[in-house]
Amino acid sequence: MMASIMSSSNPAANPDRSSTRRKKKKKIHHNPQIQPETPKIQWQSDAQQQIYSSKLLHALQQVRLGSSGSEPSSSAPRRVRDAAYGVLAATARGRTRWSRAILTSRLKLKFMKKNNIAKRQRKVMTVIAAAGYQPRRKSKVGVFRLKSKCFPAFQRKARVLSRLIPGCRKQPFPVVLEETTDYIAALQMQVRAMSALAELLTGSGSSSSSSAQLS
Amino acid sequence: MSSRRSRSGSSRITEDQINDLVSRLQQLLPEMHNRRSDKKSATKVLQETCNYIRSLHREVDELSERLSELLENADTTQADLIRSLLMH
């Protein structure tokens, strides 16, 4: 009798799982591997290339329309190139450092041209640098502590790589590697898209009916 | 995974993490012998990565040149045609 009283007064110890008090936790265990980062862009997909290509085309038309007297210093290929990288960075949707760095530097240029004041440029740069700067000074030292990565050659190449990727000069090495993988995939897509565009323009330039060639 | 605990005080970066990232990076590189990831040292992978990125930059520059020339000659009507083709 005492046992029954004890079991009734302590419902939590009740091994019977048919009670509705227990919340169903099925959904949480659906993904045991929690992804620490926001999902990155799938640069390999055709859909992504289409998005980039149409945005690039819009941007290039702007480049042509505004080419007369606005920027006499930069050449046409330079403007095409800047447009290509700008659209690429925009397509990344702010999820990577390299893309944010490209967009930020373009913003700085626009800002400078409008106001033409060096002081403001310095202000903007300090704000942006402060926003991106990590106070952890051990970040680079952390790489040196790894046994197999102590070779000076490795460190040299890691530094070179961090300078090649936009916005990664002062980033810790794993961040640089992550950014590199995304950056390379994005660049590969950019080359594919620009080549396809060039082919289209070459094809349509030589013959009037280009649709037959493309199918 | 045990190495993470022993170094938890000093740095959060583990060798396994670095190796994992490096091997993932290696798979992106356009090498014939890509599948044999153990053969390449991390330094070699870094070197090839730098070279590859530089070559991609060059390719983009060349394509920009080509596109700027093509766009000079192209009509606006052709651009609309291209855009409609891209929508497929």
Image (spheres, coloured by chain):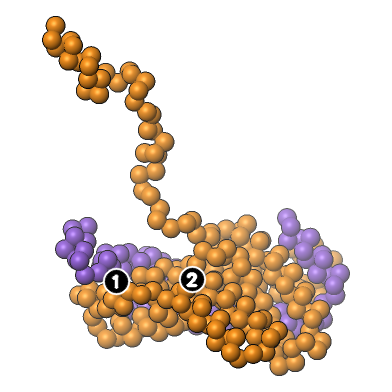
In the image: residue A149, left or right of residue A158: left
* Cα distance in 3D space between marks 2 and 1: 31 Å
Q: Residue at x 53, y 59 (%)?
A: A42
Give the structural element (helix, strand or loop) at label 1: helix
- Visible residue check, residue B34: no
Q: Chain B's shade in the image?
A: purple
Q: Please identify the quarter of the rendering in which residue A56 is found.
A: bottom right
Q: Please identify the quarter of the rendering in which residue B16 is found.
A: bottom left
Q: Which percent across, then down, holds residue A17?
A: 30, 21
Q: Please identify the quarter of the rendering in which residue A77 is found.
A: bottom right
Which residue is disc 1 drawn over?
A: B39
Q: Amino acid at mark 1?
A: Lys
Q: Amino acid at mark 2?
A: Arg
Q: Residue at x 81, y 78 (%)?
A: A65
Report the mark closest to the observer, 2 or 1: 2
Query: Which dot marks residue B64?
Result: none
B32 up-or-down from B64: above or below: above
Q: Residue at x 64, y 71 (%)?
A: A87
Give the structural element (helix, strand or loop) at label 2: helix
Query: Which dot marks residue A97?
Result: 2
Q: Work out whether residue A212 or residue A172 is closer to the camera in this orientation and state it.
A: A172
Q: Which percent across, then down, holds residue A104?
A: 57, 76
Chain letter for the orange colouring in the rendering? A
Hey, which residue is sitting farthest top in the picture? Answer: A1
Please rate how many residues cluster around mark 1, counting C-alpha atoms within 10 Å: few if below 14, some from 14 to 19, many from 20. Answer: few
Label 1 resides on the chain identified as: B
